[in-house]
Amino acid sequence: MLRFAVLLCAIISLPSAALVKSNWKEFENDQSQLKAVVFLSSTCPCSRSHVSHLNQLSVSYPEMALYGVITDRLDAESESQLLSYYSAENFQFPVLKDQDQKLTIKYSALKTPHVVLLRRGKSGSYETLYEGGVSDKRDFEYAKKRFLAENLEAIRVGRKPRHRRGQSLGCYIRRFQ
């Protein structure tokens, strides 16, 4: 398995105009035992409904390094709108561009929000613990299962994650190829 940091070397962090909690070097050098990569879209109501919950998880589980991945197409026309959204929402975790969609393709992210929970092994490479939706509903307010939160809590108390996969129920991620 490719090392997680090597895989992400092509991803560019948001310009300094955005309110970003860390930059690319910090992400690349992040040696956290747990990392979660969540695929987000500024235009998807499903993705937007989960932002507060994701912010809460990033604070409640400091042992996890949570990184957002922008799935929106970034061009000269849309960049200022995107920067405004990702700043105004006051994300409590860093948000990265996946300009070449390397992560989107690697983890077969189909809809937003889609999360991949990773744990660093003794060799330094990351294994996937969970892949799928953040919750079992398009609108987080109505969620009965909170896949990411339930897995994080299980890990915190020394158990195996409760879920290996969960369905992502949001908006399709457009492929740019």
Image: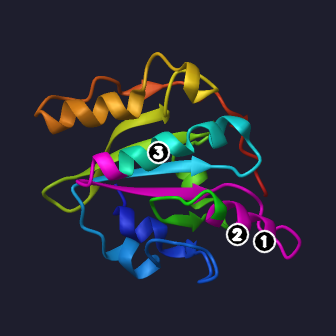
Question: Image point 45% across, 49% down: which residue?
Answer: 55
Question: Image point 39% across, 34% down: which residue?
Answer: 148
Q: Position of residue 44 (x, y in %)?
A: 73, 41
Question: What's drawn in magenta, residue-wise?
Answer: 59-87
Which one is nearer the viewer's eye here, 144 or 173?
144
Res 97 quadrant in image = bottom right
Q: Alpha-carbon distance for marks 3 and 1?
A: 23 Å
Which one is nearer the viewer's eye here, 60 or 165?
60
Total label count?
A: 3
Q: Is residue 75 above or below residue 1?
A: below
In the structure shown, which secondary structural element does the residue marked by tag 2 occupy? helix
The first of marks 3 and 1 along the sequence is 3
Q: Alpha-carbon distance for marks 3 and 2?
A: 18 Å
Query: Which amino acid type is marked by label 2?
Result: Leu
Q: Alpha-carbon distance for marks 2 and 1?
A: 6 Å
Residue that badge 3 annotates: 54
Res 158 quadrant in image = top left
Q: Residue 115: in sight, yes or no? A: no
Query: Which amino acid type is marked by label 1?
Result: Glu
Q: Is residue 153 above or below residue 9?
A: above
- Which numbered dot is residue 79? 1
- Which numbered dot is residue 107? none
Is mark 2 in CB contact (under 8 Å) with mark 1?
yes
Query: Which amino acid type is marked by label 3?
Result: Leu
Q: Residue furthest top?
A: 144
Crowdedness near tag 3: few (<14), some (14–19) or many (≥20) residues, C-alpha within 10 Å = many
Question: Image point 67% across, 32% down: which residue?
Answer: 170
The first of marks 3 and 2 along the sequence is 3
The answer to whether residue 72 is left or right of residue 58 is right
